[in-house]
Every structure is written in structure tokens, then in C-alpha cells.
Amino acid sequence: MELSSQQPGLEKLLFRYNPAGLPVPGAEEELQLFKQLQQDFSHQFKQHFPDHLANKTIVVVPSLTLDQEVLSKIKGALYYEERLLCLLMLLRMPCTHVTFVSSMPIDPVIVDYYLHLLPGITGYHAKERLTLLSCYDASPASLTQKILDRPRLIARIKKSIPAGDVAHIACFNTTPLERTLAVAIGIPLFGCDPSLSYLGTKSGSRRIFLKAGIQMPPGAENLKSYEDIVHAVAALKDMYPQTKKAVIKLNDGFSGEGNGVLTYPGIADKRDLFNWIHHNLYQAIKPVAQGLSVEKFLEKFYQMGGIVEAFIEGDIKASPSVQCRIDPFGKVEMISTHNQELGGDSGQEFIGAYFPADKSYSLAICEAAQLVAEELKHKGVLGRFSIDFISVKEPGGWKNYAIEINLRKGGTTHPFLIMEFLTNGHYDCTTGLFETANQQHRYYFASDNLQKETYKGLTPKDLIDIAMFHGLHFDGTSQKGVVFHMIGALSQFGKIGIVCIGASPEEAYGYYTKAVAVFDAETARQPAV
């Protein structure tokens, strides 16, 4: 293995490599190398991150290393990799290089679209510092696995890092596969050690909430079997008779796609209720993910475990989240808050998000998130993560329930990064407001799920033409407008991501409704040939 110039002190460990040139995944050799790389990242973070002119390379690996069967239920899941194209905004730093690796090649029109957004940097200068690499593989395997299966691609990634640059990997989530990739390339991960992944499961989240002393829905965690589910569902109703529905969640589910909902019958007698649950649970579970059978859902549950908890009811309720970051020195930051818009038949599918969250509860959830983040810091968590809540309006005010911890980037990460990069602004958790560099407040509405059958067939070039003609673009002078993402999914799936930035929540959502109206009108008529 060729050592990067920024990784001193690893030579003595290289002699323990196997003949193939890499340690066995998960073996002690790999763990020791990874530990050394992460220790080096602390030095890199302190010395080079604050320096706008430092020579550094960010290797972006936007792999959704998640359960591929559940992920396959999301239309256009392959193009979710494009969400991290927002990290091309890092090229605004004139000495920074970015290597972006994807499953399939990114259309040059899409790349040009992002580079055009860069403030203060020409497209030519940015392109000179951008390397795009592809696996040319559209299979359902995770991107990280595809890279690991291609040693020559790994060699090209290493070659893309200029001599003397410090470098690290930015990824969507971290698993043992990302750890193996980091060791193979010889650079650290800016993310959580995969050995701590339990803390980001549904069961691990409940344990952390309990230690932090914050409120969560009644329920039970660390369940493994069908019998565990039966007893947990029955005990929940027994202890909280007012509960109308139970939610059964896979430990490693995401975007609501790993959930199943059960509606309790109107049976008052406890024994009769238990018998009903025992005999009818299989038929009563309604998986959220479209096309996922109960049989397959339960098979996944037995594999990864999960929880049962009460479905929180309320006439007026919201689904806010808090995004946090822990740096290598243990500093905890509250980065942003969002109101998540959930939909679907179960009301649990992630549709989009408003930023920032409503001030009537945003300060309270930030305080709760701070307690959770402190617990995670003590466990050794590093990087970005989010905490989801359910907030219910009651006569005495809002009541906030912590739902889950996501030790990864998510659906609210890239919209915030886009606005942060474009406006050079910051979010103040104490005021609940985002302020640009010129001291103006900005808001946005973002979605990964603007999708219609009529949009199918629109190419990236068509999108850009339509956006430019109708003024659907971000204006750097006013710092308002629309930014698109997941553009590659449009032609095949009729699906596009969108971030709408305005001076008020109403203006931001107005950009969204305008975009929908424009696309509806453009696809309702056929252009002249």
C-alpha cells in the first residue's frame, strides 16, 4: 500500500498486511490502521480546516450503505448519491480539491450547474480541482462495496490526491465497509467510528434518550423475535390503554421505510386482547415501504432487531429535527433545526422539510438535542448526526418526544449545506434564525420527492432550459431562489430534488409552488419539433 504523505507513523503497521496488500476486513490490523488514521484527522481538523487557503482534498463517497432491499423500495435510490454534489461547493476555497465518486457517471450538464453556483470562483478554476470518478455500475450494491471491488478505481482515487494535500473521506453514513475503504485509500473518515453504529439504531437511540433524561414515546427496545413483538405490543396497550396504534421499527430502518404500523382493536379485556394480538399480529402489521410484504418486513426484523413504541397522537403535531456536529476535539454544535414534512398512507414517510423549525418549540428541542449530543460525545461519536422529534401541541404548550438518532447525513443535510455555502451564513440555535453574511434572515423549503409521471423524459438539459427560461434559479445578488438536486433521476423516474430559499417561509414555499406549476405546464404540452 502506498502511504499518503500526510499519514506518518503507519509504516510499522504495514508489515502486517496480507499478500493482497490490504488487511482482512474487520481484523485487528485494519482496526489499528483505522485508529491511526482517525488520530491523524484530529491534527488535520485543527491545522487545516480553519485555513481557507490550505491544500486539502475531500474524497466524497456518497454511498447509502444501508439495507439494500429496503432501499430498493425508494424510487430512484441510485440518484440519491447526487445529493452530496452540494459538497462541490467546497471548491469555493481556491486550494481545495474534490474527488467525487459515483456508481454511474454524472452528466456534465449537472456538474456545470453546481459549479455555476460557486461564489467568487470561475468554473474553469473549479474544474481544474475537481476529479469525477465512476464505477459504471448501476447494480443495487452499495457504492462503497462497488469501489472496494475495483482495486484500480481505488488506485485512481489515491492518485487524485495531490502530493502534500491533507485528505479525508466525506460519506453519507459509516459502516465497516467505509472503514475498510478508508484504510485501503490511506485517509481518515469524517464520520462516526462504525463500532459505535448501535448508538444510531432505534434501540440504541432509546437507550441514549433514557441516559440523557429526555422524553420519548412509551415502548420497548432490543427486540429480536416474533414473540418479542407480540409481548411488547400487548404490554404497551396494557400500560398505556389510551394508545391507539403501535409502531414496529427495524433497528436500521430509514426515512420511515423500516416501519410497520398496527392499529389496536376495540377489545377491553386484557386476555382477549393478548389472544387477538397473538393470532392476528401478522395480518395487522402494515409496512410503510411500498411493495414490502409483512413476511419480508418480519424477516428483516429478525435479522437486525428493532423496537415497538406508541404512535404519538395529536390534533396539532409536528415532526421537527435537530442537526448536530461533534468535532474531533469534542466540541458540540447545534447546526440547524427543521420541520420535517411526513406523508404517505402511514404519515411516516419523509417528504421534505422547512427550515428553520418553528420557534415555539425549536429552542426546547435544541436543549434536548444538546443533552443527547453530550451523551454521544462521551461515547466517542464524531461528525454530523441528527435527532428526530415528534412535537404535540397541548393546552400548556408543546410536548416534545425524541424519536431517533441518525448517525449519518440525511434528508436535511444537503439542503442546509447548499444554503450555508451559497449565503456564507449560519444558524443561531438561541434565536432559532438563520442569518446570512450580510445579516439578512433566510428560510427554505426542501424536498427529495417532487415526483410526477408527467415529468418522466425530461433530461438534465431540459431541466436547465426550463429553469433558466422561467427564472427558477438561485440569484446570488438577492440570495434567494431555487436550487435543484437529484437531477439525474428526472428522466427515468420523473423525480427531482429541490431547495427553495426565500426571505420568509411563505416566500420560500412560494418558489416551490411556482416550480411545480412551471413543470406541470411545461410537461402538459409538447414542444415543437
Image: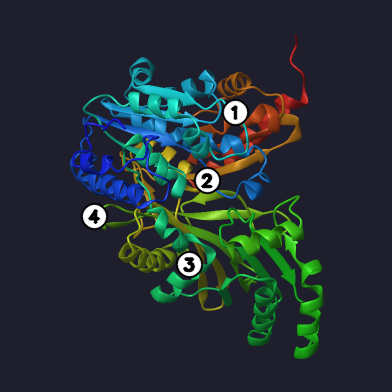
| Sequence-wise first label, 2 or 1 | 2
Residue 263 location, x and y as percent? 75, 71
Q: Nearer the viewer, mark 4 or mark 2?
A: 2
Q: Nearer the viewer, mark 3 or mark 4?
A: 3
Q: For label 4, count other residues whose C-alpha is less than 10 Å away and answer few (under 14), some (14-19) or many (20+).
A: few
Q: Nearer the viewer, mark 2 or mark 1?
A: 2
What type is the residue that disc 2 sits on? Thr
Residue beneath disc 3 = 204
Is the Cβ of the residue at disc 2 closer than 8 Å to that at disc 1? no
What type is the residue that disc 1 sits on? Gly
Q: Is residue 82 above or below residue 390?
A: above
Q: Nearer the viewer, residue 312 or 222?
A: 222
| Sequence-wise first label, 3 or 1 | 3
| Sequence-wise first label, 3 or 4 | 3
Mark identifier at residue 329: 4
What type is the residue that disc 4 sits on? Phe
Residue at 64% in and 81% down: 236
Mark identifier at residue 488: 1
* Marks 4/2: CA–CA distance: 27 Å
Give SS at disc 2.
loop
Give SS at disc 4.
loop
Q: Nearer the viewer, mark 4 or mark 1?
A: 4
Is the Cβ of the residue at disc 4 closer than 8 Å to that at disc 1? no
Q: For label 3, count other residues whose C-alpha is less than 10 Å away and answer few (under 14), some (14-19) or many (20+).
A: many
Residue at 33% in and 17% down: 125
Residue beneath disc 2 = 65
Image quarter of the C terminus: top right
Q: Nearer the viewer, residue 340 or 100?
A: 100
